[in-house]
Amino acid sequence: MTLITDTHSRAADTTAPILPAMAERWSPRGFDPIAVIDEDTLTTVLEAARWAPSGNNNQPARFIVARRGSESFRKIHSNLMGFNQAWADKASVLILNIAEGDNPWAQYDLGQAVAHLTIQAQHEGLATHQLGGIDRKALADAFHLKANQDAVTVTVLGVLGNAGDLTPELLEREIAPRTRKPLTEVLLVND
């Protein structure tokens, strides 16, 4: 087995050519603990999320953007589950992704917004990691979310750091080969 030590270049081996920002995107755990994302770049990333498609143009995506060192960052970080707390505090920003509204596609539309944010971040030279392992109720309480606002996921956003600073368990995950199911397996019908 070949270990991948250059975590700054992990382009996917795709079946067909895709946009570079998509091929190069991966979900790191090693973030630079002192890097700061400038406001213009952060605004650009959030603007990409704002312009994602949404059913009936309802735009149900809502975000709580928490910069490292802020009280909001502490609230989000303290409600991450499992070993996510061991590494996510090194990121520059934690974003709580919220679906607002009672329509059946609000979470789908939020996912689209987060995907757009993720690809724009990659294009800007930033890294993201999506987390579903969160205490959704505790986060809703901590931020006084309304009844029609669901805390769905957290996006960890930052600059790649030194993977060698990770614990052995996290380093193993960081350098593991990138894999995806074959396209033939995900297509249920392809007439």
Image (cartoon, helix red, strand yellow):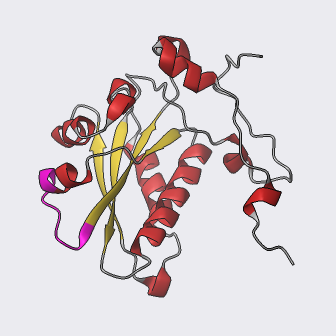
Q: Residue at x 40, y 74 (%)?
A: 106
Q: Name the spot of residue 9 as percent of width and height, x first.
A: 70, 29
Q: Nearer the viewer, residue 45 or 180?
A: 180
Q: Is residue 71 visible?
A: yes
Q: In the rendered image of this protein, does residue 178 appear above or below residue 87?
A: below
Q: Name the spot of residue 113 as percent of width and height, x first.
A: 48, 64
Quarter occupied by residue 64? bottom left
Q: Nearer the viewer, residue 130 or 134?
A: 134
147 in the magenta segment: yes
Quarter occupied by residue 27? top right
Q: Residue at x 83, y 73 (%)?
A: 190
Q: In the rendered image of this protein, does residue 62 appear above or below residue 37?
A: below
Query: Which region shows up in magenta?
Result: 141-149
Q: Is residue 88 visible?
A: no
Q: Is residue 83 left or right of residue 179?
A: left
Q: Name the spot of residue 138 as percent of width and height, x first.
A: 18, 49
